[in-house]
């Protein structure tokens, strides 16, 4: 199907088109989420809860790299979809080519930064020496291998922008299956860093699949010709205009993990918080797929000046985001006490006590968060809808408010100042999510009303 006809199909059947994009993307991310849990399972069962705790200290930096990359690729997705909506293929291809150049520059920057400051970044969290040794083994392999992650995210952003979601699904799925196969063997022979090597190999495979379909099969709408690649400052500026606020908001979330790890007094709390986030991937990545598909469709509508279709699409996406989050909440409510022990095992008497505390903390976390996930859906859909019409900074403001001004501040007050039980940290997180949902929804209503008023003029 040509992209002109795909644009027309989006216009004629917007709700159906949303699911045609969302389902393959969600499956791909869902499979990737399963990998993350399997990775956690093998590390916990073969090494112990100390490995999960070490992973918890490393993850903020991994999420920083992912956050910046996803943010910039979101700018690429939005721009390509808008130019396709305007039926300007040449400009869309120039955006894609410059985004690959951007991925190369960012990879060099990350490699240099990790090489110079890697160990110091970990020690800033107050990590114990035993856990630090484990964390460093995983950290350096993960960081250097993230170069392939960066390229795969940028290419995925290009494909999503043109409305292609099947190829990313298959690439992520195949890479994840390989990772799951390699994990137990690599961990047995190499320890915790074996998991990082397995991840790196799977990411290399994902990039290879993308390159095969782009350059050999040439089955994508966007064509890459590096012979005529030219640096375009205006395109970088436009990508940064949308991507930088999105990157900063994801960077804030990653820094939030860093700050939360620093506030938590016990390693068992870090392990529980890290595990909780990994289980949450099942709902968060589904909501990411739904809201990202919305960005592609709304951006095409915006570029094609079909403003009459935008509001109804946002309402439809919001309704489904709430339903999906509520379903996840119900499932977790009934099964979290059986799920948590699967990932927090022990290999010594000391780790048995640590595992028991971490399991209880994880269960307590979900007793609070079960009521919060629908608000996460509202926030995601609202901020991504504003991104589609060129307003990316509200996501940054909402995230700053939720993570730093509310979540981290309340947790610090409850845990460090008032010496409250860890349960109070979960109350702080829940309150911050509800407040950010209300604010992001209000901002969305404001900007969309202003858009339609300007159209009427």
Image: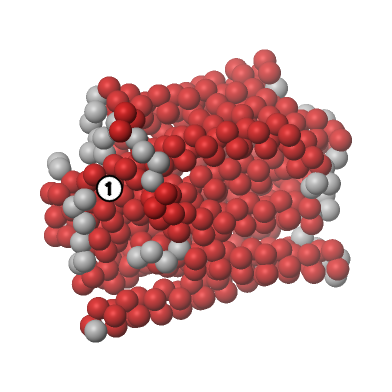
Q: Position of residue 232 (x, y in %)?
A: 38, 46
The N terminus: image quadrant: top left
Residue located 62% across and 57% down the image: 252
State the SS at label 1.
helix
Work out whether 390 lies above or below 97: below
Q: Residue at x 18, y 46 (%)?
A: 3
Whether residue 87 is visible here, answered yes or no, is yes
For this view, does 38 lie left or right of residue 457? right
At which x and y percent is residue 286?
Answer: 42, 51
For the residue pair 89 and 23, the one nearer the viewer reads as 89
Furthest-top residue in this view? 189
Relative image position of residue 41 (x, y in whole percent): 62, 34
Nearest the viewer among 104 and 386 is: 104
**Residue 77 higher or lower than 411, as above or below:** above
Residue at label 1?
91
* Quadrant, the C terminus: bottom left
Q: Badge 1: few (under 14), some or many (20 or more) residues near its Cα, within 10 Å?
A: some
Residue 436 position, x and y percent, is 55, 71
């Amino acid at each position: 199907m040509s992209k002109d006809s795909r644009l027309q199909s989006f216009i004629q059947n917007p709700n159906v088109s949303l699911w045609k994009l969302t389902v393959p993307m969600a499956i791909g991310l869902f499979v990737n989420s399963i990998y993350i849990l399997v990775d956690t399972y093998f590390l916990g069962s073969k090494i112990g809860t100390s490995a999960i705790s070490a992973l918890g200290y490393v993850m903020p930096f991994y999420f920083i790299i992912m956050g910046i990359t996803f943010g910039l690729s979101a700018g690429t997705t939005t721009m390509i979809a808008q130019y396709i909506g305007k039926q300007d293929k040449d400009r869309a291809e120039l955006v894609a080519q410059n985004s690959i150049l951007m991925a190369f520059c960012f990879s060099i920057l990350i490699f240099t930064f990790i090489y110079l400051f890697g160990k110091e970044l970990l020690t800033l969290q107050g990590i114990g020496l035993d856990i630090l040794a484990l964390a460093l083994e995983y950290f350096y392999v993960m960081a250097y291998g993230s170069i392939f992650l960066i390229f795969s995210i940028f290419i995925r952003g290009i494909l999503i922008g043109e409305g292609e979601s099947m190829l990313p699904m298959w690439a992520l799925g195949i890479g994840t299956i390989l990772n799951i196969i390699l994990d137990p063997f690599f961990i047995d022979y190499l320890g915790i860093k074996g998991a990082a090597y397995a991840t790196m190999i799977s990411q290399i495979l994902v990039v290879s699949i993308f390159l095969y379909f782009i350059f050999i099969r040439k089955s994508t709408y966007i064509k890459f010709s590096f012979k005529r690649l030219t640096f375009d400052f205006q395109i970088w500026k436009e990508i940064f205009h949308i991507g930088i606020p999105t990157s900063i908001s994801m960077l804030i979330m990653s820094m939030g993990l860093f700050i939360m790890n620093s506030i938590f007094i016990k390693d068992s709390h870090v392990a529980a918080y890290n595990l909780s986030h990994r289980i949450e991937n099942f709902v968060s990545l589904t909501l990411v797929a739904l809201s990202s598909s919305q960005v592609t469709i709304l951006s095409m509508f915006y570029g094609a000046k079909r403003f009459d279709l935008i509001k109804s699409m946002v309402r439809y996406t919001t309704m489904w985001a709430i339903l999906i989050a509520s379903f996840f909440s119900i499932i977790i409510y009934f099964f979290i006490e059986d799920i948590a022990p699967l990932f927090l095992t022990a290999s010594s008497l000391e780790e048995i006590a640590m595992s028991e505390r971490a399991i209880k903390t994880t269960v307590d976390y979900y007793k609070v968060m079960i009521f919060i996930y629908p608000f996460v859906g509202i926030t995601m859909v609202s901020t991504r809808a504003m991104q589609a019409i060129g307003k990316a900074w509200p996501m940054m403001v909402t995230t700053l408010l939720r993570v730093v001004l509310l979540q981290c501040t309340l947790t610090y007050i409850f845990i460090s100042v008032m010496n409250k039980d860890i349960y109070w940290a979960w109350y702080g997180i829940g309150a911050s999510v509800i407040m950010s949902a209300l604010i992001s929804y209000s901002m969305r209503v404001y900007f969309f009303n202003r858009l339609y008023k300007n159209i009427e003029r």
